[in-house]
Amino acid sequence: MSSSLRREFASENGTELNALLPKMSPLNPEYLTKKQSVFQKIAAFVEKFKGVGGQV
């Protein structure tokens, strides 16, 4: 979350998003749905609060 706020955008690439997800097998049919849902919430949060002052 903090790196997304510093960059002022959320990214699905890398391992940061996977670290936030609940422990699920990538083969689980719900995995992609959960990953997309979490990413959308993070992206909305970052969009709402980017540019707000302070140190992250």
Image (cartoon, helix red, strand yellow):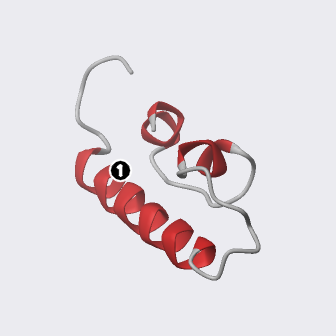
Q: Is residue 14 depicted above or below 54 in this figure?
A: below
Q: Is residue 16 left or right of residue 53?
A: right
Where residue 40 sits: x, y (%)? 41, 68
Q: Is residue 52 left or right of residue 55?
A: left
The residue carrying mark 1 is 46
**Neighbour tally class for label 1: few under 14, some 14-19, many 20 plus, Cα within 10 Å:** many
Q: Is residue 28 left or right of residue 44?
A: right
Q: Is residue 55 depicted above or below 30 in this figure?
A: above
* Residue extending farthest bottom: 29
Quadrant showing the N terminus: top left
In the image, what residue occupies the spot 30% across and 53% down?
A: 45
In the image, what residue occupies the spot 53% across and 45% down?
A: 20
In the image, what residue occupies the spot 73% across and 46% down?
A: 15
Quadrant showing the C terminus: top left
Q: Quadrant of residue 54?
A: top left
Where residue 42 sits: x, y (%)? 40, 55
Q: Amino acid at mark 1?
A: Val
In the image, what residue occupies the spot 68% across and 75% down?
A: 28
Q: Nearer the viewer, residue 26 or 49?
A: 26
Q: Nearer the viewer, residue 25 or 36?
A: 25
- Is label 1 in a helix, a strand or a loop? helix
Where residue 43 sits: x, y (%)? 41, 60
